[in-house]
Amino acid sequence: MACVMWGGHPPRLSSTSASSSTHRTYISSFTAFNLNSIALNHIISMKADANDVSTPMPVAESRQPSMLVFSGGTAFNGVVEELKKVTTRVAHVLPVSDDGGSTAEIVRVLGGPAVGDIRSRCLRLSDESTSEALAVRRLLGHRLSLDPLQAKAEWYEIVEGEHVLWNGVSRPYRETIRAFLVYFQNQILRRASENFCFGNGSIGNFFFAGARIFFQSLDAAVFLFSRVSHIPTDSLVLPVICTNDRLTLGCELWNGTVIRGQNEISHPTSGAVEPINKVVSSVPALPARIKRIFYMSSEGTNLLHEVFPAVNDSVLEQLKQVDCIVYAMGSLYTSICPSLVLHGVGETISMTPCLKVLLLNCSHDRETTNMTASDFVTAICDALNRKHGDPLKCLNNPVRESHLLQAQMEYLKWNPEKTPNTYVNVMLVPKGGQVPVDRQQLAAQGICHVIFVDSISEGKIGTIFEPKSLIQVLADLMYSSTAQPHRAGNCSNQMSTSALSEDLTTKE
């Protein structure tokens, strides 16, 4: 069944003999296949048969615990495969403010939110059970050459349908995916003066951007990508903000400096097309520690340009009903905190009685130099409480009475400040990690359930969680939590739970 059909054969887009004007003519005629004729119900049913014969679950679906994960698009990817073996009832919440890599070039020329982290997670969740599923995954996971000219030539070969990456992709998938790649190319040609650079470009990002612009909906683009890559139906990939606008991240340092852009905060580059390198020794240190993360207008440069986008309603709905909330390892301030500072997130988490697990980073990076385990907890709590922003937008945070209206004073009277273990009640630590675990300070924060998990060494990255061990610990925690709801309390009330920690750390 072909989801996108056009009459005859589409014209070729020769990258060697045609001029730019000829390319534009070809693309214009190619897009005349009328993408508006796509029948969305065809896309929905593309894998209907496959859904009926999906890989058996490790446990009955009704017994699977549910989880929501706040993460970026890199660090947690390494454990997604293992997590799928335990439960597919996972909501992956991802930021849309990345402005590095090939995402930056798409945002520069076409605008809109960054889709790189979403694309990366969708690919990790995608089906691998058939040869065609693997072919689709290879295609959408492919990156073009770093050399702009070689990348452009390869891109035209892909969009013409002649690249070897199309081998193994059946006609329905080929025509659906290719239609949106062509639509993306058409949008690039409409802005030819911007000189789009294809170097290091991600085919999945191009497909995602084409779908988002066509549907004028990030949600629709995620839905389409999920269907094309056959993500389990009970696994959700949720952009933390649903928007068609460009989002810019800002950070305020403790010395008053304001830095604009996620890339500049986390891993500034020379501006040339190059793979992102987050190794702490490869980038200069920040002049001071980060005080807070916030959103700013796309052209903004200082605190006066702060904006307050609305959180995706689906995120709040999931937070209210999951068995476990996970703050994943990764870039603390630019991958995790952008999802936490939005209005409604802290409020909902504080009212949800469930496991709330922090996966401690294995090492420091530019954002977290010299931070301890309790500092990570403080950063998460400050973000959820919106502590260091406008006092009138803070969540249950003590401020001077002179700064409050009567209604706000009344609110604080009935809603005292939330303690750290309202937001984090379990911490998983990689054995051999570089971040100091200051147990006394964690105990003072009410976090007494600290579990050390096996780790492995991974090349230039260094120490990371051993995926199977990490997911086994999470699984044991979730299944024990669903049997007996978790209650945050003081350390003396959690001594029985500490025994579980010892069992978990020694389990092979």
Image (cartoon, rainbow, N blue to C red):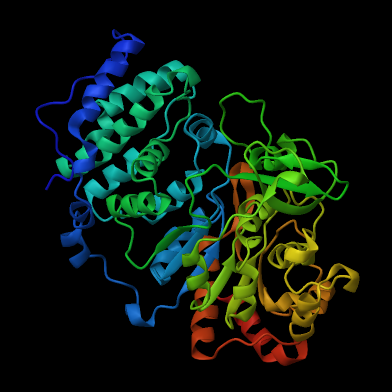
486 shown above or below 389: below
- Residue 410 % position (x, y): 78, 82
Q: Is residue 301 left or right of residue 178?
A: right
Q: Is residue 432 visible?
A: yes
Q: Is residue 131 left or right of residue 76?
A: left
Residue at 38 percent across and 40 percent down: it is 213
- How many tags in the picture? 0
- Residue 30 % position (x, y): 22, 26
Residue at 38 percent across and 22 percent down: it is 189
Q: Looking at the image, which is closer to me, 126 or 261?
A: 261
- Residue 413 % position (x, y): 79, 84
Q: Looking at the image, which is closer to me, 327 or 180?
A: 180
- Residue 251 % position (x, y): 74, 47
Give the image quarter of residue 233: bottom left
Q: Looking at the image, which is closer to me, 253 or 188?
A: 188
Residue at 78 percent across and 48 percent down: it is 252
251 shown above or below 381: above
Q: Residue furthest front?
A: 406
Q: Is residue 169 visible?
A: no
Residue at 62 percent across and 41 percent down: it is 460
1 shown above or below 88: above
